[in-house]
């Protein structure tokens, strides 16, 4: 197996975890299976860079002296807000030549500035998706997934999602056992599919200001198989259904139905990942009632059926 060079681009204002998270994944894979990866870091002039948190990183070389890698990884951070034009030009010249182009978080902004995402589907940190779409209309921005693959280009969402993407790339390059070994060593889960939403329902929605609505949010999370109709939830909040639906949306940013859908999907995913329960039991415990109803929800939200989701994203040792 040919050794793959992974080159990390460094610049002032880079987010340190955007670099070190994926780097530790590839380094772990190299330690597990020696000779698979050669990891390099480079800045424009080869000099040290200061991360957004104040950490100083010393690169291996200058970008201008770096040989074309197999994988070029562009992290994000505050430094992407006003990037050095020389960096954008370098990416525009080198990006098309590499077999695999990867960004973490707002590194997608740099790729877009270099026109490397034109006509491609991409994602970035949820807080910057609107900006990316506005400033680069040629990019098809998808704010939902934690990472997106479009041909040889892969983009990921905020910060730690770079670890998920790197694990997926290791699994692609080597095999699932190596990726699982690295994930276990880093004490992370090799479970999050690329099309998993960046937010859980609880994070995607705002916390309601009024105590009765917060109590309803907690109740939904703890009782996904309960009666979660608007009428039942409104009664729990001691509001009329119409008033409840309007207030819930105003204070959380999503409708009660959308919130319930997300909670049930997350609950079902966790059961599929963590328990041996059969599909019918998972559907019932998650509030879907029937396996077919759960299948439709999974296909719509994740693009895969529950059984396939379990096969792909539950660790082999759990079977």
Image (tube, rainbow, N blue to C red):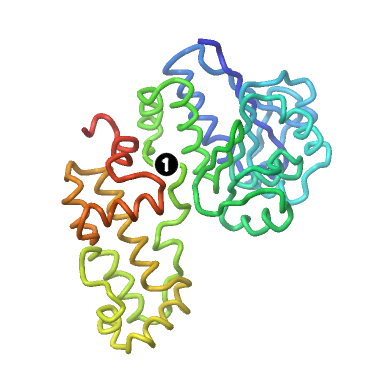
Q: Quadrant of the C terminus?
A: top left
Residue at image mark 1: 193
Which percent across, then down, holds residue 255?
Answer: 42, 73
Q: Which of 221 and 286 lies nearest the eye of the viewer?
A: 286
Query: Residue 8 is drawn in which quadrant?
Result: top right
Which percent across, then down, holds residue 236?
Answer: 25, 81
Q: Which of 255 and 58 lies nearest the eye of the viewer?
A: 255
- Categorize mark 1 by other alpha carbons within 10 Å: few (<14), some (14-19), many (20+): some
Which percent across, then down, holds residue 243?
Answer: 39, 88
**Residue 43 as seen in the image, left or right of residue 146:** right
Q: Which of 145 and 34 lies nearest the eye of the viewer?
A: 145
Which percent across, then down, holds residue 19?
Answer: 59, 36
Query: Residue 71 is drawn in which quadrant?
Result: top right
Helix, strand, or loop for circle 1? loop
* Residue at image coords 31%, 49%: 269
**Residue 314 as seen in the image, left or right of residue 125:** left
* Residue at image coords 49%, 49%: 145
**Residue 69 as seen in the image, left or right of residue 2:** right
Count of numbered marks: 1
* Residue at image coords 62%, 21%: 70
75 w.r.t. 36: above or below: below
């Amino acid at each position: 197996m040919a050794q793959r060079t992974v080159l990390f681009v460094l610049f002032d204002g880079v987010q340190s975890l955007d670099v070190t998270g994926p780097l530790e994944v590839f380094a772990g894979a190299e330690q597990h299976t020696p000779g698979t990866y050669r990891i390099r870091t480079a800045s424009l002039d080869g000099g040290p860079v200061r991360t957004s948190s104040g950490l100083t990183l010393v690169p291996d070389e200058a970008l201008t002296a770096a040989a074309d890698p197999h994988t070029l990884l562009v992290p994000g951070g505050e430094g992407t807000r006003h990037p050095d034009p020389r960096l954008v030009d370098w990416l525009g010249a080198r990006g098309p030549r590499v077999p695999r182009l990867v960004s973490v978080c707002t590194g997608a902004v740099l790729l877009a500035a270099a026109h490397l995402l034109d006509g491609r589907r991409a994602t970035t940190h949820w807080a910057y998706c609107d900006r990316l779409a506005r400033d680069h209309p040629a990019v098809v921005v998808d704010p939902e997934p934690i990472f997106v693959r479009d041909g040889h280009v892969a983009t990921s969402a905020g910060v730690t999602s770079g670890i998920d993407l790197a694990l997926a790339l290791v699994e692609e390059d080597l095999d699932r056992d190596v990726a699982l070994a690295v994930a276990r060593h880093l004490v992370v889960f090799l479970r999050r599919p690329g099309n998993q939403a960046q937010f859980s329902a609880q994070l995607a929605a705002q916390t309601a200001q009024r105590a009765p609505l917060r109590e309803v949010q907690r109740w939904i999370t703890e009782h996904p198989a309960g009666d979660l109709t608007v009428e039942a939830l409104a009664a729990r909040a001691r509001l009329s259904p119409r008033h409840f639906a309007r207030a819930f949306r105003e204070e959380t940013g999503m409708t009660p139905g959308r919130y319930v859908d997300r909670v049930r999907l997350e609950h079902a995913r966790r059961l599929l990942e963590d328990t041996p329960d059969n599909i019918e039991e998972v559907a019932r415990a998650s509030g879907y009632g029937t396996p077919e109803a759960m299948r439709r929800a999974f296909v719509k939200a994740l693009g895969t059926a529950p059984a396939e989701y379990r096969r792909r994203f539950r660790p082999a040792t759990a079977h």
